Image (tube, coloured by chain):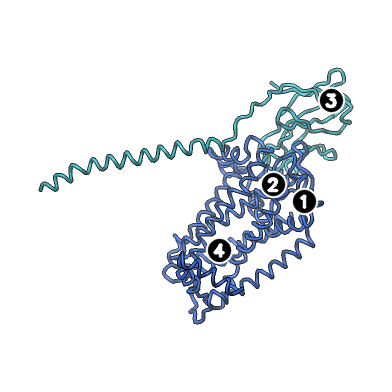
Amino acid sequence: MTQEIQKEKVQPRRDFLKYLLSSVTAGFGLIVFYPVFSFMKPPKQREVEVTSLKIGNVDDIEIGDSKIIRFGNKPVIVIRNGKEDFSALSATCTHLDCTVQYKKDESVIWCACHNGKYDLTGRNISGPPPRPLEKFKADVKNNEIIISKIV
Amino acid sequence: MKKIFTNLYNWVDERVDLSDIVKFMSKKYVPVHSHSIWYYFGGVSLFFFIIQVVTGILLLFYYKGSADLAYESIHFIMSKVEFGWLIRSIHAWSANLFVLAAFIHMFSVYFEKAYRKPREMTWITGMLMFFLALGFGFSGYLLPWNELAFFATKVGTDIAGVLPIIGEPIKIFLRGGEDVTGATLSRFFGFHVALFPGIFTVLLFIHLLLVQRQGMSEPLNEKVKKTMPFFPNFVLRDLLLWLVVLNLLAILAVFFPAELGIKADPLAPAPAGIKPEWYFLFMFQTLKYIPGYVLFIEGEILGIFLFGLAGILWVLVPFWDKKSEQGRQNKLVNYLGIFAVMFIIVMTIVGWLL
């Protein structure tokens, strides 16, 4: 009889110790692994906010030709349609991140990875791309090409 | 000479008692029957892994894992280092044949239902090693930092990013940032030469320990009458096969050395004819056939989801195939396996040709 009463008294105490010990262990594990996981997460690089960029002389690109330039961290494709007529589009395919190219003979922008095609305004016209390419503004000032973000 | 060995053995034996281990090694027998040939592919896979470790360590003497130096360092290995071309070519060929041997090993175990109780853990560790082998391939492919590798990695990690909610964090974790850059190369280098080999070694140890302890699985529908001692009979046959494989590797490396291609340039457009390694081709090709949208679901998400589901079912086969466990034929497992083999072969060929 007395033994049973003792057992009943001891059990909750034991449970309490068990819970305490397991939560301390879990907490300790969290404290150890938090820095490890945080370390693996790449730090946010402060991006240089580029809004406009001089990319060189008008004659650097021949009429009907194109050039890919770095705009901030992203590639932008600049196409010379006429004497002072340039168009600029993001060069990153909206499908799976490949870099597109200008296909002169077909007058399209083409992605070699999965055969996606865009027209010269950046509209996705065939293949897997789900969205059009982002547009940029291309101006000519004092014989220099200036690419800027459209706000 | 023999005396030195005997003395050395006795010296160790006196301190740690080797008799258990010797008994453990000598007790195993290999069943001899009409399907015995499949027993060799695990050993062949192991041999390719050993080759990878050895040639990988050698390449580490010269390889530099940064975007500015990686391509140049491999160019240096291929052109200046004595036998550098050979070591790199063997590493590249052995990687491909390793995956192939692992494929064969996996399918033979599947069709023989050797995963059935009590060998579930052997199957699971094997499958985990198989996925790691694919991870080795994907991460190692980027290390030369050439054009093909650059875009293959862009596409591969972007596919992971398609997944809802967890996709974007996974992509950033893999890339070490928003884009594929030198940070990605450093990460993949770390995965390829430290993280993956570490995990793989542990799994391999468990896998081999289980095989040694439980012995070889016997076929379901064939009574085994003959056996052969694992040591030395089976081991010697294994070694002979390893010798043949080593010669094959040498021939392939000499006549078809690994290429280096053009250095990756983030501002260059993707080159035409871009393809992943052959063992990813069937998935890549399938993704191409799934339309942009199926009902409300984006095609790519559906594809990844289906492959994921199939993969999980495949890994868990010892737990849902109850018939084989009871020693009965399970036709469904066979049909699913045949379908998987046919699907992989057809899609790989189509992907190769188109």
- Frontmost of labels 1 and 2 is 1
* Residue depicted at 50% across the width and 58% down the height: B124
The residue indicated by pointer 4 is B337
* Residue depicted at 52% across the width and 38% down the height: A36
Crowding at dot 2, Cα within 10 Å, few <14 / some 14-19 / many 20+, comes out as many
The blue chain is B
Q: Which mark is residue A56?
A: 3
- Frontmost of labels 1 and 3 is 1
Mark 4–mark 2 Cα distance, whole angstroms, equals 32 Å
Q: Is residue B122 above or below residue B139?
A: below
Q: Label 2 sits on what residue type? A: Leu
Q: Is residue A151 above or below residue B27?
A: above
Host chain of mark 1: B
Q: Label 3 sits on what residue type? A: Gly
Tell which circle, 1 or 2, labels the residue nearer the N-terminal end.
1
Q: Nearer the viewer, residue B48 or B329?
A: B48
The cyan chain is A
- Frontmost of labels 1 and 4 is 1
Mark 4 residue element? helix
